[in-house]
Image (tube, grey):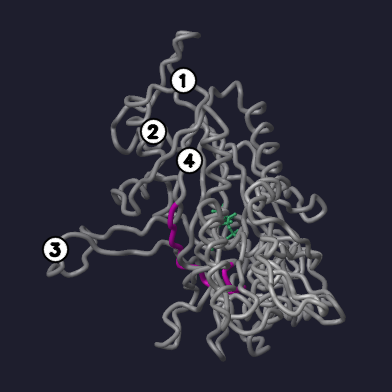
Amino acid sequence: MSKLKSSENSSGASNRMEEIISLCKRRGFVYPGSEIYGGLGGVYDYGHYGAILKNNIRDSWQKSMIQDREDIYLLDSAIFMHPTAWVASGHVGNFDDPLVECKKCHNRMRADHILESFGISADKMPIDFINKELDKLREEKKLKCSNCGESDIAEAKKFSLMIKSNFGSPTEALCEENVVYLRPETCGGIYLQYKNTIDSLHPKLPFGIAQVGKAFRNEIAARQFIFRTREFEQMEMQYFINKKDTKEKYDMWKEVRMKWYLDNGISADKLTWYKHEKLAHYASEAYDVKYDFNCLGGFDEVEGIHARGDWDLSQHSKFSGVDLSYYDEESKERFTPHIVETSVGLNRLFLMFMDFAYTEDNLGGEKRVFLKLPKKLAPIKIAVFPLLRNKPLLVEKAKEVYDLLRKDYMCEFDDNGNIGKRYRRQDEIGTPYCVTVDFETIEKPARPDEDSGRSGGDNTVTVRDRDTGNQERIKIEELSEYFKKQF
Ligand code: ATP
C-alpha cells in the first residue's frame, strides 16, 4: 500500500516513532518480545498499561458491533482450523508477498513496497509484472537495498505468509499429513461456523458474525514497530447479505466504520478512504481506511472494507461438501449469501491511538510529554495521591478516596516521589484526572492568630485535568457525580 510520504518529513517521522517506542517501553505499554534472549523479529509483548489500552480499544469495537446493534453475533473460534479450509480459501496456494533479497547484506524487502515507493502500483500484481518493473529500475540504477544501499538485488520470488505448525502426537515428526496452519486471518473461523450459527441462533439475513483474535503471518519485513508484526490481533466482522443488497450494505458499513473512528476522538482530517482499483476476481468493491501516521510520515492502512461476493461460502461448501446455502422465507429463494467484510488490526489501531495521542507542550514553563488519549480508552482513568507519603492521615484519607473511586473506574494509587513527578508519570500514560488529598482535606490550616484548636478539614480534594493542567477543588462526597459527567 503506497504511503503519501515526503522526504522532508521522513526524519521527523522516524524521530516520532523512536519517541513512541521509547515511551511504550519506559512506561510499560509495549516491550520487544523475548528481549532477554536478544528478541524475536516482529513479535511484541504488551505490558500492564498496553494490555489495558488494547482491551479498551477492543471493547469499544465490540460494543459498537454487538451491544449497539441487534444483527451481529459474537464468535470466538479456534486458531487451528482444518488444513483443507486454507486450501479452499486460496491461502495455501496464493497467500504470498513478492520477496527480494539484497545479495550483499541479505536484507529482505517487499518488492511491491519498493515499486510503490516509485509510484508504481503493484498491489496483487503477478510476479512477472513485478520483475519487469524491477528490471526497469535496475537499468535506471534506482534499485537499492534499503539497508546497505547496494544495487545487487536478486529477482523477486513469491514468499508464502502462512506459518505452519504440527498437530497430533508430539513424538511424530512434522510431516505434510499433520501440518496445520496458524490462521493468517480470523474470518476463516467465521465461515466455518456460519452453519452452526444459523442452526443454533436462527438469524435472518442480513446478519453478521464478529470476532476478535490472534492472527499470524510470516511477514517478509516485519518493521515499523507494531504496525506490521508476525503475530497480531484482528477484529473482523462478516455481514451476510442477499446479493441485491450489496451496494446499500457496503455503503452502510463504510459509514458505520468511519463513525467509529470519529466517535473515538480521531479527527476527520487524519482519516481518508483509499479505493482499491485492482480487485480479487470475486470481489466487487474494496476500500481501506487510511490514517495519517505522524510516526510513519503519512497515510497508511488501518482497516479494510470489502465486498467479497459469495466466494467464501461457495468455496467452503465445495471443499467440505456441506450445503451452506440460505433459504429466505420471504422471497422463497435459496441462495448462497454474499458477504461484506470489515477487517481491522487491533495492534495497528493501538499504534494509531498512540500516534494521535502523543503530545508535547509547555505547562507552567516546563516541557512535558503527555498522551491525549480519549478518556474512555485511557488505561487508568483516575490516579489518587496523598500529598505526602509520610503523613499517615493523608495516606489513610487518600486510600479511602481510592477505594471509593475504583469501584467504578480503573484507578491507581501513587505515593512515589513528589507531586510533580507523579503528574508527569500519569501524563505519560494518559491518565485524564489526578486527585490529590492534602492538608485542606483533613484539617483547616491554622491561622496565624490561632494558637490552638485545628478544626477538621473541609473534605475537598484537588482534581487536576491532564490536558489543561487546571486544578479545582471538589468535595469527596461529590466526586462520583463529578466523574460521572466526565466519562
Ligand atoms: P497490508 O497491505 O498492510 O499487508 P493487508 O491488506 O494484507 O495488509 P488485510 O489482510 O486486509 O491486510 O488485513 C486486515 C487488517 O489487519 C489490516 O488493515 C491491518 O490493520 C491488519 N493487519 C494485517 N497484517 C498485519 C500485520 N502483519 N501486523 C499487524 N496488523 C496487520
Name the N-terminal-most of marks 3 and 1: 3
The residue stretch that appears in magenta: 213-226
Q: Dividing the picture into quarters, in which one does residue 36 lie? A: bottom left
Circle 1 packing at 10 Å, graded few (<14), some (14-19), many (20+), is some
Q: List the residue tagged with mark 3.
A: 169
Query: Is residue 225 a member of the stretch shown in magenta?
Result: yes
3D distance between C-alphas at marks 2 and 3: 30 Å
Quadrant containing the N terminus in the rendered view: bottom right
Q: Secondary structure at mark 4?
A: strand
Circle 3 packing at 10 Å, graded few (<14), some (14-19), many (20+), is few
Q: Are marks 4 and 1 in contact (CB under 8 Å)?
A: no
Q: x%, y% of residue 295?
A: 72, 71
Q: List the residue tagged with mark 4.
A: 210
Q: List the residue tagged with mark 2.
A: 194
Check residue 204 in the rendering and tell me which mark sits there, or answer none: 1
3D distance between C-alphas at marks 4 and 3: 33 Å
